[in-house]
Image (spheres, rainbow, N blue to C red):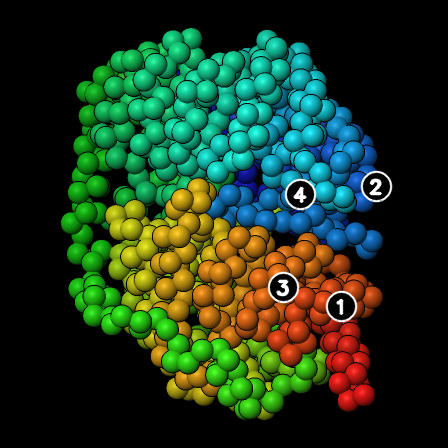
């Protein structure tokens, strides 16, 4: 009998229960006992749902109050030492301080989880980092699952992946030097899990899909030989890419099973089935864990039948990766178009797809013939739907002349024209776009969507918020203003709602980081912009102040990356469609007198293929898409872009090729570390390194800001340096926002005065 299992399930809950639970704790509305009770109730609800769906083995350890990589740091007793906390005695308050910072320490650096839109907290390794097994939290969850009659499979980040994900702190050293001590800690953890009477443990090693250095690849065999001393059955899981280059030695590892992502990399299967060891489980990731399109059950079952004929009960079936990246339950969607809904599958539906595949293998195709027929019908209906293709979009793309994505003049010629009319001081200050989304703003938007607030009243409410934001920025003496984005629910959803080819869910939330959830749009067809999206709001904001106000747009690559994207066209083609739609908006903004326009692209880095051999092709079409989005603007129009929570050093030529006049980046959590790459590269255009972390409620001290700006001035000439926060201020409250921005402006003015005095001396 084939086994069906998961690497992980959406922990946020069907209605984002985890988000609201955690935020109540942060606001001191509930105590730790209530927090733990709520988390336990949510975990147990999810396990019982999986059991009811016929899952043979359920993951344990995939649930986290904030981040599973942070939980792994706690598990091995290696949380950042600068906080002074004891991992074995860590309170919930201290746990969240690691993630969000406190009055004396900035939060742990956050970056993207491989090429997904999930963010993880980066481990901090020192040459003398000590590890200590701390299995108690995981053992408690195992006991909870077993009490419900759940067959539990603990899921841990593998030791090599955990080491790789971290950053070296202090003097330079080789992270692999920590492996022996870490492996000893893992052996202690496995011993504790064995005592808890579990049979299988899954060790996730997604770094195998990367271009790893030879010494890291060579470390796998001895590491897993050491871990194999445990009596537990180890399932090594890979996902997000092709690992066929390692097939021979992976098959030879002393583990009881191997999981492969056959959605992202179906071509790798042949390398593993040839000569597959008869005593090992092959877990086939055949259901897409990262997108929402319904599986082609007929094709997947055919593949499973072929594998089952070879492997028998050694074949396990699973999603390609954790369902962390999938919305919870499609059944909640009461307003989706019926046809479109029939093309989709969320996490709960993916469980059902696994169950059907298992039944088809056990009892034959006839046992699921109705479900196969429904799957085939939905696939054919989607393929032939007239809603998918728009002839005018294809014609416009085909008619683009060569070089249409290039600005008329190089930056060196554009910059003086922009400076001449902007007349900004040295070290100009700005923000990234959004200002606090207060309860009043959210209530007005919700009432408008429900039809309880008429259009005129809603517009008046949003204009009042825009004026408030403009006046506060003027009072703070910020140089380049923003309108605050009060009218926007999300930086991608807001635009998708106004573009053809997009659809929206009510409850299709996925976790981005911590309690931050996003509801990605669904790109189901060709993309076009029927009418202007932001122009009237930007024009109104600019009418309120003589200072320049930025038009704020989300870039094509980010809209693509942060949506659930159709899988019947290359992603590059979809991105170019979006770029032309954004370009229509850019030109309309410019024609309306908005001459500073920010096109945010925080997702450029995360879209990189995991293997470098595929980078050039991606960067070429991603860069072209960004440039297409601002093609045709006048040289005097200043184009900004924003990127955050990514490493940029290895793609700086591609970032420079975007040819934005000003780029703003996140640098505060890394203590300006990211900026050094821009300095070494001699980035040619203007740059604004974020000087404080907006994802933390703490207000930075002026001495901190001064230190960071001094570091920035060491690598970027003052004439090309901007001053701004790390990211948008949507999630922050007004008191902390005003205090932090006032500190930023105060420090900037002092430095500006010093620089001007030095220049005049």
Would residue 299 be found to the left or right of residue 636 on screen? Answer: left
- Residue 391 on image: x %, y %: 17, 64
Q: Secondary structure at mark 3?
A: helix
Q: Which residue is mark 4?
A: 167
Point 50% across, 88% down: residue: 417
Q: Is residue 270 above or below residue 718?
A: above
Q: Secondary structure at mark 1?
A: helix
- Residue 404 on image: x %, y %: 31, 73
Point 30% across, 24% down: residue: 270
Q: Which residue is mark 3?
A: 679
Dot 3 crowding, Cα within 10 Å, few <14, some 14–19, many 20+: some
Label 4 or label 2, whichever comes before in sequence order: 2
Label 1 or label 3, whichever comes before in sequence order: 3
- Does residue 35 appear in the picture of this structure? no
Q: Which residue is mark 1?
A: 710
Label annotation for residue 599: none
Label annotation for residue 84: 2
Q: Nearer the viewer, mark 4 or mark 3?
A: 3
Q: Nearer the viewer, mark 2 or mark 1?
A: 1
In space, the residues marked 3 and 2 are separated at their CA atoms by 33 Å
């Amino acid at each position: 009998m084939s086994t069906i299992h998961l690497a992980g399930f959406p922990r946020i809950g069907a209605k984002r229960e985890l988000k609201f639970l955690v935020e109540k704790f942060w606001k001191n509305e509930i105590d730790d006992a209530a927090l733990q009770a709520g988390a336990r109730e949510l975990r147990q609800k999810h396990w019982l749902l999986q059991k009811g769906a016929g899952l043979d083995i359920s993951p344990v350890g995939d649930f986290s109050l904030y981040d599973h990589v942070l939980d792994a740091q706690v598990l091995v007793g290696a949380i950042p030492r600068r906080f002074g906390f004891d991992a074995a005695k860590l309170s919930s308050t201290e746990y969240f301080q690691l993630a969000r910072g406190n009055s004396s320490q900035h939060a742990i650096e956050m970056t993207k989880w491989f090429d997904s839109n999930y963010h993880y907290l980066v481990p901090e390794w020192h040459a003398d980092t000590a590890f200590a097994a701390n299995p108690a939290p995981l053992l408690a969850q195992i006991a909870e699952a077993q009490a419900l009659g759940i067959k539990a499979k603990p899921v841990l980040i593998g030791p090599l992946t955990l080491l790789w994900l971290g950053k070296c702190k202090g003097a330079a050293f080789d992270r692999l030097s920590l492996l022996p001590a870490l492996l000893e800690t893992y052996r202690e953890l496995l011993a504790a899990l064995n005592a808890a009477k579990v049979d299988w443990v899954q060790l996730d090693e997604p770094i195998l899909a990367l271009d790893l250095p030879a010494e890291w690849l060579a470390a796998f065999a001895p590491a897993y030989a050491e871990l194999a001393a445990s009596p537990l059955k180890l399932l090594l899981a890979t996902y997000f890419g092709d690992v066929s280059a390692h097939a021979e030695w992976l098959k030879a590892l002393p583990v009881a099973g191997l999981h492969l992502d056959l959605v992202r990399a179906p071509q790798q299967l042949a390398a593993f089935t040839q000569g597959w060891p008869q005593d090992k489980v092959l877990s086939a990731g055949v259901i897409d864990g990262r997108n929402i399109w319904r599986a082609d059950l007929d094709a997947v079952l055919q593949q499973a039948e072929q594998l089952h004929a070879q492997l028998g009960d050694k074949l396990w079936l699973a999603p390609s990766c954790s369902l962390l990246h999938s919305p919870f339950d499609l059944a909640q969607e009461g307003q989706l178009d019926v046809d479109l809904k029939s093309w989709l599958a969320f996490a709960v539906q993916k469980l059902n797809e696994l169950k059907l595949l298992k039944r088809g293998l056990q009892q034959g195709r006839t046992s699921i013939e109705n479900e196969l027929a429904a799957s085939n019908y939905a696939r054919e209906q989607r393929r032939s739907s007239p809603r998918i293709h728009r002839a005018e979009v294809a014609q416009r793309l085909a008619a683009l002349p060569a070089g249409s994505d290039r600005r008329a003049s190089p930056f060196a010629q554009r910059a003086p024209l922009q400076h001449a009319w902007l007349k900004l001081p040295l070290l100009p200050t700005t923000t990234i776009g959004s200002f606090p989304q207060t309860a009043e703003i959210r209530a007005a938007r919700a009432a408008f969507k429900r039809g309880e607030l008429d259009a005129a009243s809603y517009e008046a409410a949003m204009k009042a918020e825009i004026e408030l934001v403009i006046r506060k920025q003027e009072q703070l003496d910020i140089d380049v203003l923003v309108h605050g984005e009060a009218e926007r629910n999300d930086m991608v959803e807001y635009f998708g709602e106004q573009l053809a080819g997009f659809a929206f869910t009510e409850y299709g939330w996925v976790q981005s980081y911590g309690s931050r959830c996003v509801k990605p749009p669904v790109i189901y067809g060709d993309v076009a912009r029927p009418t202007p999206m932001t122009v009237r709001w930007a024009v109104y904001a600019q009418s309120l102040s003589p200072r320049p106000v930025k038009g704020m747009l989300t870039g094509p690559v980010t809209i693509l990356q942060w949506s659930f994207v159709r899988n019947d066209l290359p992603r590059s083609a979809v991105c170019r469609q979006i770029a032309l739609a954004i370009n229509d908006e850019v030109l309309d903004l410019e024609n309306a007198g908005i001459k500073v326009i920010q096109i945010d692209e925080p997702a450029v880095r995360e879209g990189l293929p995991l293997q470098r051999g595929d980078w050039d092709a991606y960067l070429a079409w991603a860069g072209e898409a960004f440039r297409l989005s601002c093609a045709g603007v006048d040289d005097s129009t200043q184009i900004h872009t924003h990127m955050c929570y990514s490493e940029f050093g290895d793609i700086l030529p591609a970032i420079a090729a975007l040819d934005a006049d000003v780029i703003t980046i996140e640098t505060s959590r890394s203590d300006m570390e990211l900026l050094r790459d821009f300095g070494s590269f001699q980035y040619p255009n203007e740059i604004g390194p974020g000087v404080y972390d907006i994802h933390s409620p703490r207000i930075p001290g002026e001495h901190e800001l001064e230190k960071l700006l001094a570091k920035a001035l060491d690598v970027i000439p003052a004439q090309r340096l901007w001053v701004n926060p790390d990211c948008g201020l949507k999630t922050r409250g007004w008191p902390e926002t005003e205090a932090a921005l006032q500190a930023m402006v105060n420090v900037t003015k002092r430095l500006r005065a010093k620089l001007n005095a030095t220049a005049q001396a």
